[in-house]
Amino acid sequence: MNLNELTIVQAQEGLKNKAFSSLELTEACVSQIEKRNPEINAYITVTADLARAEAQKADELIASGKQNTLTGIPFSVKDAICTAGVRSTGSAKILDNYIPPYDATVIKNIRDQGAVLLGKNNCDAFGHGASNENSMYGAVKNPHDMSKVAGGSSGGSAAAVADHQCIFSIAEDTGGSIRYPAALCGIVGLRPSYGRNSRFGIMPMASSLDTVGPMAKSVEDIALLMEIMAGPDPKDATGVQNAVPKYTEELKKDIRRLKVGIPKEYFEVDGMDAETKQIVWSKIESLQKEYDLELVNVSLPHTKYSIPVYYIVVPSEDSSNLGRLDGIRYGARAEGEDLYDVYAKTRGKGFPEEVKRRIMIGTYALSAGYYDAYYRKAQKVRTLIIRDFENVFNSVDVLITPTSPTPAFAIGEKINDPLAMYLADIFVGPAAVSGIPGLSIPAGKTKTGLPVGLQILGPRLKEEKVLNLGYWAEKLKL
Amino acid sequence: MKLERKDIEDLAKLARLDLTEEEKNRYAEQLSVIFEYFEMLGEVDTENIPETCQVTGLLDVTRPDIAYQQDTDKLEKLMACFPERQARLLKVKAVFKKQSN
């Protein structure tokens, strides 16, 4: 096994036992990036020299026995998350030259534990998309089939982890941006509960939904990263004060007789791929058999409304949040005759098509006369979607669903049909508007070799429950 | 809900977006389809249902009203992000046009 293929837990072990150095581990990742990134396009910026310097420092710390949890372990970061001194574009040309003076709080937490930064991952610009085709730096290709999308919006992070161009990655999930590409690329990704991890330093998309979470090669790695990332931050007033559980311990608890809900709406949707459904079902059946789970059929009747709710609420909040990008204080500035002209030209040129489309949708949905019909109505239906989850979690511990109705689709297939692209979010959207945690883990592969993801949803702030089932599910052979 | 080209032009102006003719035509078509899809929310009875504006239940999160010492190095780095500057000042286009005599 090549060093870059290791999980965090395996890398920690090897570094501790001096089986290899952080510099060797880092070089293995850098050489995989150099070999594969020109085609896969998972990175916008590679910080190889910085990574080597950080790895050398890590090796000194390890030699003197002063290492932290992640000392010497190489990772990557979605480009919509700020990294101190390292260009952060959000995959849009309007921030092509933007170098943040600070790290996002979660990145600071990770780097304080000694992790080595390899670079910044491609994504749909500002997180807008499900295919990673809405990047002004080109689409990301799926490492399992180069003609297919990697999923989005955190497609670069997912592809980098799947292709072993890093050991783990930090990304964000507003409507499914961690879980969806994790499923399409065959890796593990967690959307934490809203408010669980600080969002300070994350380029804001939809402030009432945005979360930041880990993408990795095993559920145990995800638990370990969550212990480091989670917790209150004075710089994020929307964060919760609840104590952070010891996820790595909760992980291994016995799950016999766990009550698992199977929501019928997640198996009966139009356009559901039969093979995907069958793979997820057979995984559920083997889990039930192995761990004596109690499967309960449940219903979440407002599921289908989560797409219109999501695509009204999110563009509305998007259009407000993106108002800050106007070419005045930072980023690219276009020449114009007067101030208005500078704004309009900077934004017209600096945003890709989908970002502009969402700003237009949001501006319309929030405009006088339409606010009640769209935004307010969507916020009311959102309440009903949340109540659906509250009701089922009164009788079951967690839910199992497919993460996506289909495996990865062809690059270009849906790019001219935004509505078809929005419908890809059908199984990841409801948890997003409700603020509950969701984990995607690999469930198997189609006959053509494309990964299929299984999603575990849990009650708000109960990440340990979804990780617990995920851990045991991962132990079963695919 | 059918959006016309004129609606798109008005929205683009409000949103400070310079759009090409081709973009205006495409957005008029696509936004019409998208807003028509949104109409399905009309099926849902939301009488007496409160709006969800946030999901944490947190109220009035405040911090003490005191000034914090700021890092001057960080300030320099922030100013380095200015697209145009003159000494320590951010340079922008005039807001008002000059009156011609």
Image: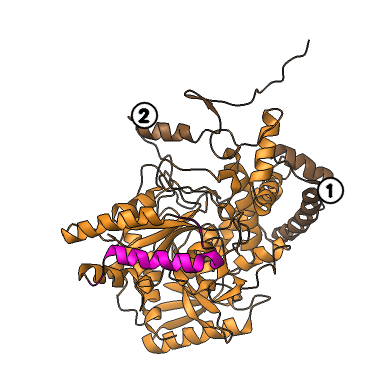
Tell whether position A45 is magenta. yes
Q: Identify the chain drawn in brown.
A: B
Q: Write down the residue under mark 1.
A: B4
Q: Identify the chain drawn in orange.
A: A
Q: Residue at x 32, y 67 (%)?
A: A25
Q: Nearer the viewer, residue A130 or A379?
A: A130
From the top left corner, tell me how far across and down residue A35 is, in percent: 48, 68
Image colouring: by chain
From the top left corner, tell me how far across and down residue A168 is, in percent: 40, 65
From the top left corner, tell me how far across and down residue A368 is, in percent: 72, 39
Q: Give the alpha-carbon distance from disc 1 to disc 2, as whole Å.
A: 49 Å
Q: Is residue A222 among the parts visible in the rendering?
A: no
From the top left corner, tell me how far across and down residue A255 is, in percent: 34, 79
**Residue type, numbered disc 2:** Asp
Looking at marks 1 and 2 on the same chain, the residue that comes earlier in the sequence is marked by: 1
Q: Mark 1 packing: few (<14 Cα in 10 Å), some, or many (20+)? A: some
The circle drawn on residue A11 is: none
Q: Residue at x 65, y 72 (%)?
A: A410
Q: Write down the residue under mark 2.
A: B65
